[in-house]
Image (tube, rainbow, N blue to C red):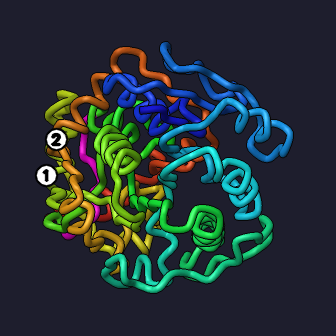
Amino acid sequence: MRMLVLGGTWFLGKEVVAGALARGWEVTTFNRGRSGPDVPGAEAVQGDRTDAADLARLAAAGPWDGVVDTSSSELPPRDVLLAARALSGQVGRWVHISTVSVYADWPHRALTEASALLDCPPDADDAFGHTGQDGSPTKYGFQKAGGERAVSEALGDRAVFLRPGVILGPGEYIGRLPWWLTRAERGGPLLAPSPANRQIQPVDVRDVAAFALDQAAAEDAGAAFNVAHPQGLTFAEFITVCLTVTGGTGRPVWASPEDLDRHSVRQWTEMPLWRTHAGVWAVDSSRAVAAGLRCRPLGETIADTWAWLRSDGRPVAHPRWAEHGIAPEKEAKIIAFLPGATG
């Protein structure tokens, strides 16, 4: 099996490459060489996927049985279209890493793959789309929906779309789980969003990578798959595991959404993984599970991420890391307002 990975040097892309090599596949990566070293054993082709000449040079190194595109998250649809057209004749299946943000109803309503998508042309530039007053829909979601249309236009039924929500695990560069882990280690009263029994369903980066490779090797027609943990865990379980693996001696102090809003706590960033919308953690992944998605217990994801951090794990520098987590002074002020709060 010959595999092309667009990206391949950090987080999901790195796991895809490592997983493909472990299967004995021949792997080519294509990236600018700025975010980290390529995985040993892969053939690295350096170039800019927004440059037609670089894409032509890459295409000359083909063909490949499949491609996994892990590097289009910050690109407008027109650049996704450029790469898909340039490589369409040199690849079999194209596995495109997308997002649940492409759905018009996310995060307000429960989602299946039949849910309506945001409308964005396949050749849109980076100005297309908007973000709603309540944070949804997002310009990012419009752009990613346009990217899916671009791949569909170029690849037809050879295109596979994976739509994860939140991806966690070793190598995470966003900073959601690392913040909770370092906060748990610090100890003391720990502000937590109630209800404590609310289910969340992030997915491990290694499980997404494995499913992407399975789909790249599949022989049926392309499809779209929601990629979310089918069991998940409650917020109380999540915090308990964070405290356990870090040896933190603190205890959660549960605050209602109304109390957190009263103190202007930003959902999703100041309180990572917390969002009150009904559909944010109501993503149906049964189609992916039927197609072979296997998700390890999230407790294992949390423990392995802590082990990575403790072994001097250093994610690729990313501006979103600084967005996550509430300041200690603000947290303490809110907890003082809520003495003895329970979940």
| 155 and 267: which is toward the camera | 155
Gap between marks 2 and 1, in whole Å? 9 Å
Residue at left offset 56%, top offset 49%: 323
Q: Is residue 199 left or right of residue 280?
A: left
Where on the picture, by quarter, is residue 90?
A: top right
Q: Over which residues does the magenta segment extend?
A: 187-195
Where on the picture, by quarter, is residue 186?
A: top left
* Residue 188 belongs to the span the image colors magenta: yes
* Residue 183 belongs to the span the image colors magenta: no
Q: Which residue is mark 1?
A: 237
Tell me which label, 2 or 1, sits earlier in the chain: 1
Q: Which residue is mark 2?
A: 299
Residue 259 picture location, percent across and down = 34, 73
Verify CB contact (< 8 Å) between mark 2 and mark 1.
yes
Which quadrant, please, contains the C terminus? bottom left
Residue 228 picture location, percent across and down = 29, 60
Residue at left offset 54%, top offset 32%: 8
**Judging from the image, what secondary structure is the residue with disc 2 in?**
helix
Which of pointers 2 and 1 indicates the residue nearer the eye? Answer: 2
